Image (cartoon, grey):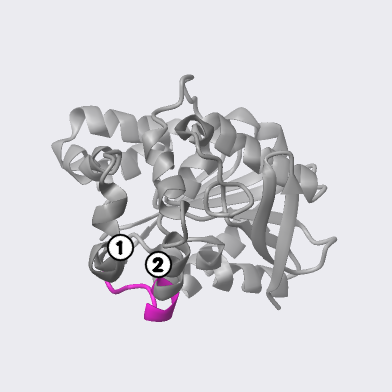
């Protein structure tokens, strides 16, 4: 059964969903843009049924209680610190970390900086940042796919995305996410300041320090119809994991893996957790 949680930290109060026994093996799941914790509803519920303690927060800017105004407050250092703060508030000394899209990027950085805190890493869609950086520099296809990251830093992005009743935001989901869920995301991002906060993740710029190879057991799930991340970075991610590594390719699935292919992803995740 899904629970609705409020998790206080030094940065503010995060809204979250959770499931499973409080003494179960802890799993933290991080959502992407332009979504929220509920993108993980299926996985959280299944993990809870399997005896895990699964929690998915609305991340910085998405939780009204953690919505700072400055762009600098959305730099990667702060996003990774939020992961550690959430785990601390939940009294988790060690946990499994799962991330999709922007949540996947945060998960990679958290695994690099806090390997002692993670039991496993699961990244969905988002390749290792160094693999992505190399692809951006040397692969024309990936450079074209990632142009939106630069475009969305402009000051008129909010107006463009919310035009025509938010139709541009709706089209991002490629009709692969249930309409009711998309309505929920649009309502959340239409709240004053919410979309600006979410876009500030893009505007904050690149992390100042370099990320290295990840040492924790890692599952990377990539889908062949992902519009944002091409095969060059996906296949190169293996080079940036020095610990046990598994790569799973989902055929004919778009970027929205947790909601488009919930059963497939959950099965892969559970298998990964069971083996480590």
Residue at image x 33%, y 35%?
132
Residue at the far front: name it: 192
Q: Marks 1 and 2, Cα distance to the nearest angstrom?
A: 7 Å
**Residue marked by disc 2:** 186
Marks 1 and 2 close (CB-CB < 8 Å): yes
Residue furthest top as drawn: 209
Q: Secondary structure at mark 2?
A: helix
Residue 149: horizontal and vertical position, in percent?
29, 41
Task: Specify whether residue 243 is in view.
Answer: no
Apparent side of residue 152 relative to residue 24 in the rendered image (left or right): left
Q: Residues within 10 Å of mark 1 (few under 14, many from 20)?
A: some
On-image quarter of the N terminus: bottom right
Seen in the image, is 10 located left or right of residue 45?
A: right
Work out whether mark 1 precedes mark 2 in sequence or the reverse, and give the earlier one.
Answer: 1
Q: Relative to 42, does residue 201 appear above or below in the rendering?
A: above
Q: Residue 175 lies in magenta, yes or no?
A: yes
In the picture, residue 80 is in which quadrant?
A: top right
Give the residue at x 40% y 28%: 206
Residue underneath mark 1: 169
Residue 134: in magenta span: no
Q: Which residues are magenta?
A: 174-182
User: Residue 170 in the image: x percent, y percent?
Assistant: 30, 68
Could you say which quadrant of the image residue 18 lies in? bottom right
Q: For numbered disc 1, what is the local secondary structure?
A: helix
Q: State the image quarter where residue 238 is shown.
A: top left
> Which mark, by number, is residue 75?
none
**Does residue 97 appear to the left or right of 249 in the view shown?**
right
Please say whether residue 12 is visible from this viewpoint: yes
Residue density around tag 2, few if under 14, some if 14–19, many if 20 or more, within 10 Å: many
């Amino acid at each position: 059964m899904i629970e609705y949680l409020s998790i206080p930290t030094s940065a503010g109060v995060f809204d979250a969903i959770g499931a499973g026994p409080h003494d179960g093996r802890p799993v933290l799941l991080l959502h992407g843009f332009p979504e929220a914790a509920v993108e993980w509803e299926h996985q959280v519920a299944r993990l809870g049924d399997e005896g895990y303690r699964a929690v998915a927060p609305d991340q910085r800017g998405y939780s009204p209680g953690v919505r700072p105004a400055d762009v600098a407050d959305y730099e990667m250092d702060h996003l990774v610190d939020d992961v550690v703060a959430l785990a601390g508030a939940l009294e988790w000394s060690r946990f499994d970390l799962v991330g999709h899209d922007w949540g996947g990027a945060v998960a990679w950085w958290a695994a690099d900086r806090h390997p002692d805190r993670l039991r496993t890493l699961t990244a969905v869609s988002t390749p290792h940042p160094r693999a992505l950086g190399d692809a951006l520099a040397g692969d024309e296809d990936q450079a074209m796919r990632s142009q939106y990251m630069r475009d969305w830093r402009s000051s008129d992005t909010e107006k463009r995305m919310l035009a025509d009743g938010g139709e541009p935001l709706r089209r991002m989901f490629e009709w692969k996410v249930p309409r009711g869920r998309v309505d929920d995301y649009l309502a959340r991002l239409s709240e004053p300041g919410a979309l600006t906060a979410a876009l500030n993740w893009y505007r904050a710029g690149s992390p100042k320090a370099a990320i290295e190879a990840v040492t924790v057991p890692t599952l990377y799930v990539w889908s062949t119809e992902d519009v944002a991340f091409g095969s060059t970075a996906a296949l190169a991610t293996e080079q940036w994991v020095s610990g046990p590594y598994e790569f799973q390719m989902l055929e004919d699935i778009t970027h929205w893996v947790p909601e488009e292919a919930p059963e497939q992803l959950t099965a892969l995740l559970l298998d990964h957790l069971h083996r480590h």
